[in-house]
Structure formats: structure tokens, C-alpha cells
Image (cartoon, helix red, strand yellow):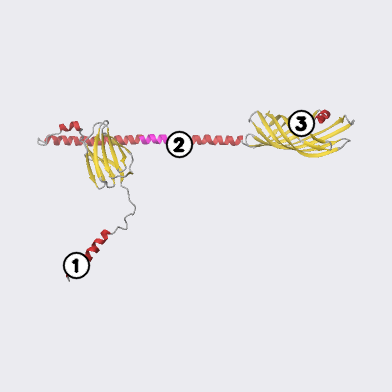
Amino acid sequence: MKKIGNILSRIVMIVILLPSLSPSLDRPLTREFPFLKDILFSFQADCFMVKILSDPYSSLHQFELSEPNRLVVDLYGIENIKSNRYYQVEYPEIKSIRTGMYKSNIARIVFDFTKDIPDYKISESPEGITVLFPFEKRNRKQKELRPDPSKNQEPQKATKEVTSKIQTTVQKKDIEDLEKKFLEQTRTLTTALQETRSLLEESNAILKEMQEAQKKEEKKFIRIEALGSLYRFSDENLRNQFQTSFMEGAEINIGIGNYVEFWMAFKNYTRVALDPEQGTDRKIRIIPLEAGLKIRFNKGMINPYLGGGLGYHQYQDIHLAEEIKNRQIGIIGQAGFFLKAAENLVFDLYVNYRYCQIESKSGEFDIGGIHFGAGFGFEF
């Protein structure tokens, strides 16, 4: 029976201890690094309180530095920082509070003081560390002037009451000053935002005007011209027989953007001249249909341009020896400028050169040549 009792007691103990020995289902499997979470500060009745919130740490080490005066608090076992790295404190004795990782597992908090190092008290809690700065602040040099507790404390009580009233008044004044500063900063920020909004609205208006002006400049146009030119053949035989003679025609130009035009032209050259070898008249007719692009270099009163394109040439040559009819494509290049005499009236001066080979029984010859031409028309 004793053995059975011992066995039952051991089973009961195992059942009781089993939940505490088994891992919790709610516990995360991954390791969480301890953090320095945040730093809070506030005015209390008798002190200025700074709370350093952190995860559990292994140990704490504090020390003071001079030139400038600082209080340093190191938290061992903290591996990262979630708080801000810099705090500006509205307390006369403290200039700022800074945080940083001194080493991979040491978080450092530094109190920068405006003058001497004031009295302070550091205490630990499960939430982290609390640093208290009493309003009855004395630096290290003033500690010798503290009252003797063995003496009569009645004057000290009156002094404490007066000091408490003074501190209350100072706190109210500090709060009022902070409220004034906050209101001034709010007004300044509001004014800056209004000015920024006005500048943005003006910029948008200017941008819209520029876009509308650009659209007007890029407006497509059509220009129709009547042309006349003096035509001088490249081929020596044609040049000797027909000399420099007149070619007439018409041209249409379509604007593409600011500086590019598409042009098409119809021209006609019909002349009769005496053939000195056969003593008979020789009649030739050239009808080129042309198309190409022009590039304008300005948009104003005087507009120089360069152009190039292709011409489909219908050629007819009639004399006693033979009659030649042929159609060939030639190359055209031209340069010139046109002058806007009025809002829609345009005068055009240009030089045109073409090259086009024609086949005949006696061989090939070039019906191309150079043109010195002028035209006038209307632009819409």
C-alpha cells in the first residue's frame, strides 16, 4: 500500500508540474530583441521627471562628464533603439537628451546640461528608469550650504512654503510662455503655408498661360503659293537650245509643329526652240509633281528654311528624229526664306536644284537643273 501511495503522489506531482515545464503555445518561437522604447518627460509638483521606457535590461551604469557637463546612463542588454535620437527639453537646466547605441548591446542616454550638473535621483522600475530633477536644485558646489537637520526647522518650513509658491508661479509662467511660443509658431507656420499656397497658385497660372501660348504657337497652318522661276538645265545640249527660261507652278505647305512643314507642288515647263543640227523646231514639256519636307529656322517676319523631297517627272520631247515620252523620279533640294508682309500675305524667295535622268535611244541625259524662283500666297 505504501508503494501504491508513493506512486500516486509522484503522478500527482508530475501532473501539477507538467504545465509549467511545457512551452507556452502563445510564446513566439523567434527571439525578440530588447529595445529602448521611448523617453517621456513631464513637470511634477516638486520635480521635473524623465521616464526612460525600455524592455528588461541586464544592468545599469551611470557617470558624469564635464566640459560640457553631462550625465550618461548606460543600459546593458539593450540591442536596439526605437525612440527618437534627440529630444529638446523645455526645462532650464537641461539642454537636450540624446540616445544612441554605444556598443552592440549597450544603449546610451546622455543628458546635456546648460550649466552645472543639477541634483538628480535615478530609480528603476519594470517599465525602465525614472530620473527626477528636484526643483530645489543645487549643484555640487552648493551642497555645503544645506541646512543642519538638528537645528530649528520652523524658518525652513516658512521658506519651503514661499519656495513652493514661487515654483508654482514659475511653472505657470513657463506654461504661459510655452503657450505663447506655440501660438507664435502656429501663426508663423500658417502664414508660411498661405504664402506657399499663393506661390503655387501663381506658378500654376503662369504654367497654364505658357502651355496655352505654346499651343497657339504650335497651331497647324496651311500656306498656298503661286510660283515662278528661271530654269537653267544642267545638260549642256538642253541649256544651249533652251537657254534660261521660265517655269510656273503652285505649291501648298502644311505646318507640322513649330518648325516643320510638309509641301506639295505642281509645276509646268513647256518650251519650243530651234534645233541647230536639224534646222527644225524642238518642243519639250516637263511636268514635275513634287513632295517633301521643309525645316524653318525662325517664326517671325523673315523665316529662312531648308527643304528636300522627291519629284515625279513626266517628260515629253518632240522633234523630227524621235519623240521621247518618259516618267522618272528625281531628287529635289531647296533653300530660301519667306517674308510675312501682312497677317496672312506671304512672299517667298528660293533656290531649287533637281536631278532626274531620262533614257532615250541616244543615251541618258539629265533634265534637272537649278531654279531661281519667287512666289506669293496666303497663310491660314
Between the residue at mark 2 and the residue at mark 1, the CA separation in whole angstroms equals: 86 Å
Residue where numbered disc 3 is placed? 369
Question: Is residue 13 left or right of 336 when viewed as pictured?
Answer: left
Amino acid residing under circle 2 = Arg
Residue 188 colored in magenta in the image: yes
Q: Tell me which label, 1 or 3, sits earlier in the chain.
A: 1
Q: Residue at x 17, y 33 (%)?
A: 143
Amino acid residing under circle 1 = Asn
Q: Residue at x 61, y 34 (%)?
A: 217
- Whether 337 is drawn above or below 107: the answer is above
SS assignment at label 2 = helix
From the image, which quarter does the N terminus lie in?
bottom left
For the residues bearing labels 3 and 2, Cβ distance under 8 angstroms: no
**What crowding class fits label 2: few (fewer than 14 Cα within 10 Å), some (14-19), or many (20 or more)?**
few
Foreground disc of the pair 3, 2? 3
Give the residues drawn in magenta, as a range: 185-197
Residue where numbered disc 2 is placed? 197
- Whether 371 is drawn above or below 76: the answer is above
In the foreground, 207 or 74:
74
Foreground disc of the pair 1, 3? 1
In the foreground, 206 or 233:
233
**Quadrant hosting residue 210:** top right
Q: Position of residue 238 (x, y in %)?
A: 82, 31
Q: Position of residue 374 (x, y in %)?
A: 73, 29
Label drawn at residue 6: 1
Amino acid residing under circle 3 = Gly
Question: Does residue 208 show up?
Answer: yes
Question: Is residue 340 left or right of 279 when viewed as pictured?
Answer: left
**Quadrant hosting residue 226:** top right
SS assignment at label 3 = strand
Question: Does residue 380 show up?
Answer: no
Question: Is residue 49 left or right of 286 when viewed as pictured?
Answer: left
